[in-house]
Image: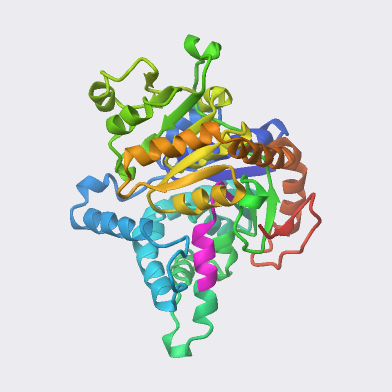
Amino acid sequence: MKVLFTSLAHHTHYYPLVPLAWALRTAGHEVRIASQPELTDVITGTGLTAVPVEWSLGALEDLGLLGKLHDEASAHVQGFDYAARGEHPWTYEQLLALENVMVPTLYGALNNDTMVDALVDFARSWQPDLVVWETFTLAGAIAARVTGAAHCRLVSGPDISVRARKEFLRLAAEQEPEHREDPTAEWLERTLRRLGCAAGFDEDLVTGQWTVNTTPPSTQLDLDLPTVQVRHVPYNGPAVVPEWLRSHPGRSRVCVTLGSSASDVGVDMAELLAHLAELDAEIVATVDEATREAAKDLPDNVRLVDFVPLNDLLPTCDAVVHHGGVGTKATAELHAVPQLILAFGWDTEVMGRGLEDIGAGLCVPSDGLLPDVLRKQVQRLISEPSFAHGARRLQEELLAVPSPNEVVPVLERLVAEHRGAPGAATAEHGTNGLGHHRG
């Protein structure tokens, strides 16, 4: 069969798709990866075939007022209380405001008409049997609906946006008809009509006909969605194991990585590392050139690197401090490494609190973070056995989940059931196939 993957043009969104794409490819299926031209070299660097689709916005810094609006909207969405930690539950007005911001400035901007039209044109010519789309590229679901392909959503972190939407729909049903709005449905319905698609909107354009989830089942939100569980397989991009990593340091090792979101976290990395240097441990930190210069006088137990493959580094670590990146979190889970997440918005607090509940890590809000507090929390991770035990339980759970190769027959069966039947009801299957997961 022909399988089309769609991804936002950022490697952190694309990399979680790579193992499943290769599993389908080595099973004999044709695979294409569609994204904006900025990701083409990254895609071809993974050995897969890229389909560049145009994106009309260009660089946000060149957009003037629209770029400023996008930045302000992103800040609002990032800071939304996805963990529902306040004294009162979400209200309809709060969730409607979230939808009203997300649709034009996030989903609609990332899946604008130019990008959607180019993707649909390719899908009409290539005629995929299955479209696999990551959560930010709803254009994949649109292209599947227009062409009659089966489609599924790949989730690699807490499914916060769908949880918020499900609560929004529940509260909307309680409103008087004249007070009900659904910006997401209106945008998608309008887009389908513009494309001449007779099949209109239904909720699987937001959730997928089924979800492929790479996170451990116990860490998933309780959304009662048809779900195929698949084990996370780390992919870090091109990687070389450095010589210093080929032997154990002889004492505890702590990895500190803030990934591509370092500026969002708002932490002074040099100051943070200076406090962590007080630990009886080797600190391995991935930093940029500016941080390397600012931190050049740190003690010898701090090793500064620009990049090191986490799948090779983390098995040697006793703890990892990070920003809630889904790749870092998943790789730490696979190698049973206790984690400390610096929560700065989006889904980071949800995943951090989840690790605390399981006993596999700690969560510290980055807002107003005191480096001395962070040092004490890292000391707990490397000295209190309960965190290592919790991390091993999470590892055992993840290793029991089928690998990407093992789920290929499940996907083949689901495609046969769903292709050409947009909006069809989803049947519940057994735990080795497709089931309604409740985390």
Picture coordinates of residue 205, whole percent (x, y)? 55, 62
Pick the front one: 150 or 226? 226
In the image, is 212 to the left or to the right of 37? right
Using the image, determine if residue 323 lies above or below residue 182: above
Pick the front one: 291 or 225? 291
The residue positioned 31% from the left and 56% from the top of the image is 75
Tell me which corner region of the image, top left, top right, bottom left or bottom right, holds residue 246.
top right
In the image, is 423 to the left or to the right of 137? right
Tell me which corner region of the image, top left, top right, bottom left or bottom right, holds residue 104.
bottom left
In the image, is 227 to the left or to the right of 330? right
Does the magenta segment cover residue 274? no
Does the magenta segment cover residue 158? yes
Colouring scheme applied when the structure was drawn: rainbow
Using the image, determine if residue 1 lies above or below residue 191: above
The quarter in which the C terminus is drawn is bottom right
The quarter in which the N terminus is drawn is top right
Picture coordinates of residue 102, whole percent (x, y)? 39, 62
Using the image, determine if residue 200 lies above or below residue 35: below
The residue positioned 54% from the left and 64% from the top of the image is 163
Q: Magenta segment, which residues? A: 154-167
Picture coordinates of residue 144, whole percent (x, y)? 58, 56
Picture coordinates of residue 196, whole percent (x, y)? 50, 66
Pick the front one: 431 or 382? 382
Would you say residue 174 is visible in this rendering? yes
**For the view shown, which residue lies furthest in the top direction?**
243
